Image: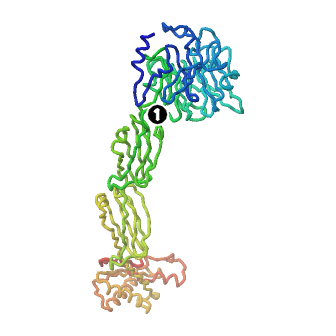
Amino acid sequence: MFLGLSVGLSAQESVVNGVKVKNLTEVNTEYLEYSPIPFQNGLMFTSSRGKGGLLSCPPPESVGFSDLYFAPKGGNGHYGEAKKMKGKINGKYNDGVPTVVPGGARMYISRNNNEGKNVKDLIDRKIYLAEKVEDAWTNLTEFPFNSDTFSTCHPALSADGQKMVFSSNRPGGHGGMDLYMTTLRDGKWSQPVNLGPEINTPGNEIFPFLDQDGNLFFSSDGLDGGMGGLDIWAARESSPGQWTLLTNMGAPINSVADDLSFYSAPGGSEGFFASNREGGLGMDDIYHWEAEGEPLEAVVVIYDEDTGELLEKVPVEVTPVKINSPMGLVYGKDAVTQKQTFQTDPVGALKYGVVKDAEYAIHAEKEGYIPADRLVTTLELTKDGEYRIPLKRDKILFNLDGLVVNKKTNAPIPMADIVIIDRTTGERVPMVADGEGSFRVEIDCKHDYQIVASKAGFGDDTIDLTGLVADCQAGKVERPILRLPPIIRIAVEDVYFDFDKATLRPEGKQALDKVVTYLNEYPSLEILLTAHTDSRGTKQYNMGLSNRRAKSCMDYIISQGVDASRLDWKGYGESQLVNECADGVPCSEEKHQQNRRVEVIVTKFNEENVIIKDNH
């Protein structure tokens, strides 16, 4: 016994993964001490002390019966002498593993009435509700789902007392002892529900505890990834009735031995557990644990890689990839312990809590930028005060201002039609210039563009824009000016003749006078006079008639001072009728008149900044 005590004192305190663990020597003995919970101004726990001599530390099967004890806590933080709790709560055989109903006047316990077996063992146990009358616990009543054919034990109440998780080997489980939940409805406990294969295994799941936040802690010898013996695990209710396993609590909470009876104070900064690990005072000892330090704050700043501009309203997804501190995973106050999405503030920053000794994946994505991904440690996030992530533009956007002008006069052309063609994507964006011929369009400088401008009364103009990145970044993109040549339309009526005549009528001379005006205004203009007849008469005769008509028009134009070299003529006879009045087709004189005509066709025009079109 004394040798064991000496070894225990040499390993009473340790710090691993930011958690300090200390053997609670004030309450531990060479016997079993476990299931500690703070109660009133002290500590309530289960112990097998005082029920027989255990100088040789025999195995649990021969340990005396367990009872509930209470150790008051002094002003110096140390616990005083532990005494057995009063009343019928401690019976003839085994009692322990308490959970207190909110208010402190009632509590549930496990009781074993089989002689020779301790309540720590996994057989023939039941749950009882006890009431406190003055300073003693009495009026024990059975939990409604107890049975004489299987065990129901280790009750754990939620903080509000409305839920209970307990352990049982009742039929229908996954093997060994399973965890079940029941809910208090109208003063009655509901039918227990197995917590499912995410939590329960073919082994044993025992000693549950529900903390202030609803996190579930329990011991298991069947879950993969344990350190040995019974390990303490944490789980969380992801949706009503659905439980997700969070983590093995790891060292120093767990060891290669049995670790059980986990308790966490509200806030998760400290608590207790029990273990029969090497270095203890006895068989199972109670340990106090304390998480060191507060969660760290990470500041992430998102900015434009090219301009340095701080980017606001950027969605940033933070996902814990690896948290080496199980305590931090469960109790990282305000820390990111599961995937969360934030948004940067007006100065491009976001702040969030991080757990020590962890790795986080950060994904930032903003329209117009290439998404950025980082895998960083807590140290990298916090060592310089802020962690900066640049976003590279997927699009280099630029507001391009253009202008449409008259190619001949340089005067702006209002309300011109514009088509912006993205030659990289094929997208076409139509728009209209304003009243001063200006237009603005947002372009991606990484793309190539073609701009086409048009306007009634003008020819089109096209500008190609390529290789814009450097100019955009320098803010020196040349303003595109589209110059539309005005269209000079020779709107000359056809010259019509009387039947079988080649003599110009007065209205015919007026039409040719307009042609003379254009010829005088534009020295490069050359024309062809084409003459036609109706279908009456022979084809040979009509061909000659058309030649005479063409020659008549040409002679008139020459008589007005136009050089003959700028003129040409051709007769077509009746070969190019404009209607159905061919040989043998009865037609009115008006329709025949439509075919007796001379047309004026532009054959050459080289005036700069001007486009000329005739009415043919």
Asked whether the viewer can see residue 348, the reply is yes
Q: Residue at x 67, y 23 (%)?
A: 130
Asked whether the viewer can see residue 171, the reply is no
Nearest the viewer among 80 and 260 is 80
> Where's residue 473, x and y in %?
31, 59
Q: Quadrant of the N terminus?
A: top left
Categorize mark 1 by other alpha carbons within 10 Å: few (<14), some (14-19), many (20+). Answer: many
Residue position for label 1: 329
Q: Residue at x 47, y 17 (%)?
A: 276
Question: Which quarter of the figure has residue 19?
Answer: top left
Question: Which quarter of the figure has residue 428?
Answer: bottom left
> Where's residue 294, x and y in %?
43, 38
Q: Residue at x 43, y 55 (%)?
A: 346
Question: Which quarter of the figure has residue 82?
Answer: top right
In this picture the colour scheme is rainbow
> Where's residue 447, x and y in %?
35, 56
Question: Which amino acid does the dot numbered 1 rest on?
Answer: Leu
As drawn, 270 above or below 49 = below
Nearest the viewer among 424 and 16 is 16
Q: Is residue 294 left or right of residue 164?
A: left
What is the residue that sits farthest to the front in this orientation?
75
